[in-house]
Image: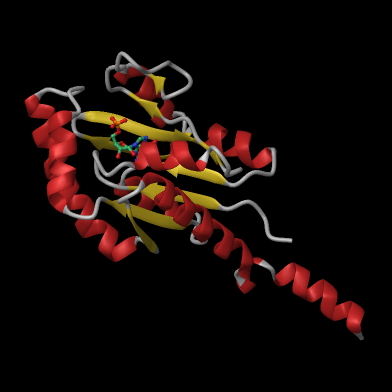
């Protein structure tokens, strides 16, 4: 049968990725990697659950040691995915979700061409801007950096990503996310071993 998938979920800050995933985890079985970052921890976050919070020095050591599948600098901080996170999840036979920005998505696709790249965006740009401004967890300068990043993300996603989920209602978006995973598992290209096996046995 088909093996575990590598699924990338991207979308600008304020696109609702976290809510989508939280709803998905209520019924879905794919597991999310815990990324490494150098950005400051937010009050509601826990080290090791939301991110592994590294100093720049420690992050750069991890890069030098080849521990990262992908990494990038986003809004002034490093973010990256440890190989060990992919191994941890695939070893248990689960599909892996990477909630990362688009440069990371592009790098994952280069490494795993069969990875599924999903982009999410609110129904219109005004919603994104107001969500970002009203979030209250970042200062004005950071909000500006994130809006500039959003423009680049949309541009990159058009070229590289496989699917778009318009994130209007979180439950509906989570269902679409699960449907994409389900369809991908059913793709003929994912099931060649099964087909070869049954072909042998019908003769
Ligand atoms: P935040 O600071 O809001 O948690 O995340 C900022 C951006 O970094 C988001 O788009 C998030 O998906 C992305 N991000 C989080 N972890 C990683 C990672 O491991 N690699 C890459 N490339 N981006 C990441």
Q: Residue at x 42, y 56 (%)?
A: 117
Pinpoint residue 59: horizontal percent, then vertical percent.
Answer: 37, 24
Asked if residue 190 lies left or right of residue 175, the reply is: right
User: In terms of image quarters, where does ligand 1 lie?
Assistant: top left
Pinpoint residue 24: horizontal percent, then vertical percent.
Answer: 50, 43
Report the coloring of the rendering.
Answer: secondary structure
Asked if residue 146 lies left or right of residue 60, the reply is: left
Q: Nearer the viewer, residue 30 or 108?
A: 30
Pinpoint residue 167: horizontal percent, then vertical percent.
Answer: 32, 51
Assign the N terminus to one quadrant of the image: bottom right
Q: Is residue 144 above or below residue 102?
A: above
Q: Residue at x 17, y 46 (%)?
A: 127
Assign the C terminus to one quadrant of the image: bottom right
Q: Residue at x 75, y 68 (%)?
A: 193
Q: Nearer the viewer, residue 56 or 44?
A: 44
Q: Residue at x 43, y 46 (%)?
A: 171
Q: Is residue 172 above or below residue 34?
A: below
Asked if residue 192 lies left or right of residue 111, the reply is: right
Asked if residue 72 lies left or right of residue 46, the reply is: left
Pinpoint residue 112: horizontal percent, then vertical percent.
Answer: 50, 55
Residue 181, by quadrant, is: bottom right
């Amino acid at each position: 049968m088909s093996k575990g998938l590598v699924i990338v979920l991207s979308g600008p800050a304020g696109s609702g990725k976290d809510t989508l995933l939280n709803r998905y985890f209520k019924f879905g079985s794919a597991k999310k990697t815990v990324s490494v970052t150098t950005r400051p921890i937010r009050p509601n976050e826990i080290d090791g659950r939301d991110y592994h919070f590294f100093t720049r020095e420690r992050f750069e050591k991890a890069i030098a040691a080849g521990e990262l599948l992908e990494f990038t600098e986003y809004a002034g901080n490093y973010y990256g995915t440890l190989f060990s996170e992919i191994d941890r999840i695939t070893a248990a036979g689960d599909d892996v979700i990477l909630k990362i920005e688009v440069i990371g998505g592009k790098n994952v696709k280069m490494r795993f061409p069969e990875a599924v790249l999903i982009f999410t965006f609110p129904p219109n740009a005004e919603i994104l801007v107001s969500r970002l401004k009203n979030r209250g967890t970042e200062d004005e300068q950071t909000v500006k950096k994130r809006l500039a990043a959003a423009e680049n993300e949309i541009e990159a996603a058009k070229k590289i990503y496989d699917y778009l989920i318009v994130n209007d209602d979180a439950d509906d978006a989570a269902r679409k996310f699960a449907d994409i995973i389900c369809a991908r598992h059913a793709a003929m290209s994912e099931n060649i071993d099964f087909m070869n096996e049954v072909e042998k046995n019908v003769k």
